[in-house]
Image: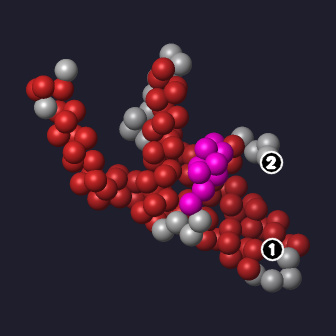
Amino acid sequence: GSGCPHTALFKPMARFHLPLANEEETIFRATATYMLAQYFVRTGGGEADFNLEKLRDLYRTIQEVNQAMATRVRSGSKTDSSVNAIVLLDMYAKAMPYVIRQSLEELRYLFEPFLNILDSPEKA
């Protein structure tokens, strides 16, 4: 690994990488990974962030990392393809803090069976 504390948070997503993921898949994987991490925080005695505030902060920090990486790659590359790959990743990082809530609401219908079961009086 690179040892970067900011990108280390993406290690679980890298482990279950989905090549050529679209925006919806990326948002699903990012938030699911984050929520699972919050489960581990909570069961470890910490205070979980189920409002996704720290996830937004993480993606804002990743924007800075991506910009620095693009600058470094640009200085050492004769073509734009490597820089373009970082720019594409950065587009997700820039959009994520703003689209999380709306995108999750758009995925809500997928969880209706869970919500119906978990909200029913017979759930116990």
Give the residue type that dot 2 points to.
Ser
Question: For this rendering, which residue is in front, 61 or 45?
Answer: 45
44 to the left or right of 111: right
Above or below residue 38? Residue 42 is: above
The magenta span reads 9-18
Residue tagged 2: 2
Query: Residue 123 at x, y = what percent?
Result: 18, 26
Q: Residues within 10 Å of mark 2 (few under 14, many from 20)?
A: few
Secondary structure of the residue carrying tag 1 is: helix
Residue 84 falls within the magenta-colored stretch:
no
Marked residue nearer the N-terminal end (1 or 2): 2
Task: Give the residue furthest to the left.
Answer: 121
Secondary structure of the residue carrying tag 2 is: loop
Instruction: Name the residue: 49% across, 59% down.
Output: 26
Q: Quadrant of the C terminus?
A: top left
70 to the left or right of 18: right
Asked whether residue 99 is in view, the answer is yes
Instruction: Name the residue: 61% across, 44% down.
Output: 12
Give the residue type that dot 1 points to.
Arg
Q: Residues within 10 Å of mark 1 (few under 14, many from 20)?
A: some
Residue 10 falls within the magenta-colored stretch:
yes
1 or 2: mark nearer the eye: 2
Task: Give the residue furthest to the top.
Answer: 45
Query: Residue 13 at x, y = what percent?
Result: 59, 49
Magenta stretch: helix, strand or loop mostly: helix
73 to the left or right of 39: right
User: Where is residue 82, by image quadrant?
Assistant: bottom right
User: Where is residue 57, by image quadrant?
Assistant: top right
Q: In the rendering, which numbered label is found on residue 74?
A: 1
Instruction: Name the residue: 17% across, 33% down.
Output: 119
Instruction: Name the residue: 81% across, 69% down.
Output: 73
Query: Residue 92 at x, y = what percent?
Result: 53, 63
